[in-house]
Image: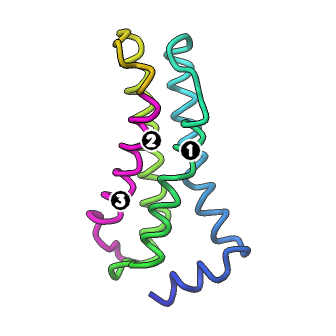
């Protein structure tokens, strides 16, 4: 638990931004692939920007408040795994928009909700990794 408190207290040090970059770079790559594949069907909105911040803040807040005995190895692994989950969700949004569902304008809201639930689930279900 002290390791995580040190990371939070030293947020200005390289830990915080590096962890966020380990999340946002793979997420942006997946979102770019989804946009390339479904060019006319995905319109990025402010909710897509929130998808790049809120789930990560939920996950990082949970892991810093209640680490559940997790090691520092969990930080990069879970961060990248959350990015992959978000990328897959954006790809699913593209597929659903391609089929022209009547409720497709609500997909970004639903995507934000599901990605936030995924952040909580990731923190809750991933066990401690060996250091």
For mark 1, give the secondary structure.
helix
Which scheme is used to colour this image of the protein? rainbow
Q: Earlier in the sequence, mark 2 or mark 3?
A: 2
| Image mark for residue 120 | 3
Q: Tell me: 99 left or right of 50.
A: left
Which contiguous range is marked in magenta? Answer: 107-130
Q: Position of residue 61 (x, y in %)?
A: 49, 69
State the separation of the CA atoms marked 3 and 1.
Answer: 16 Å
Q: Neighbour class for label 1 at 10 Å: few (<14), some, many (≥20)?
A: some
Mostly what secondary structure, the magenta segment?
helix
For the C terminus, the image quarter is bottom left
For mark 2, give the secondary structure.
helix
For the N terminus, the image quarter is bottom left
- Measuring 42% from the left and 69% from the top, which residue is drawn there? 74
Q: Earlier in the sequence, mark 3 or mark 1?
A: 1
Q: Which residue is mark 1?
A: 50
Q: Which residue is mark 2?
A: 112
Q: Nearer the viewer, residue 82 or 112?
A: 112
Q: Using the rendered view, name the quadrant where residue 47 is placed.
A: top right
State the separation of the CA atoms marked 2 and 3.
Answer: 13 Å
- Measuring 39% from the left and 78% from the top, which residue is drawn there? 67
In this rendering, is residue 70 above or below 115? below
Q: Neighbour class for label 3 at 10 Å: few (<14), some, many (≥20)?
A: some
- Measuring 73% from the left and 74% from the top, which residue is drawn there? 12
């Amino acid at each position: 638990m002290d390791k995580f408190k040190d990371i939070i207290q030293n947020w200005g040090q390289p830990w915080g931004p590096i962890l966020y970059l380990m999340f946002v770079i793979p997420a942006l790559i997946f979102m770019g692939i989804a946009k390339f594949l479904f060019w006319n069907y995905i319109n990025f909105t402010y909710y897509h920007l929130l998808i790049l911040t809120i789930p990560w803040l939920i996950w990082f807040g949970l892991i810093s408040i209640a680490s559940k005995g997790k090691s520092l190895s969990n930080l990069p692994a879970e961060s990248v795994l959350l990015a992959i989950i978000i990328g897959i969700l954006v790809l699913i949004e593209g597929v659903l928009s391609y089929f022209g569902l009547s409720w497709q304008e609500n997909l970004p809201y639903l995507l934000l909700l599901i990605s936030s639930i995924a952040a909580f689930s990731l923190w809750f279900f991933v066990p401690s990794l060996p250091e």
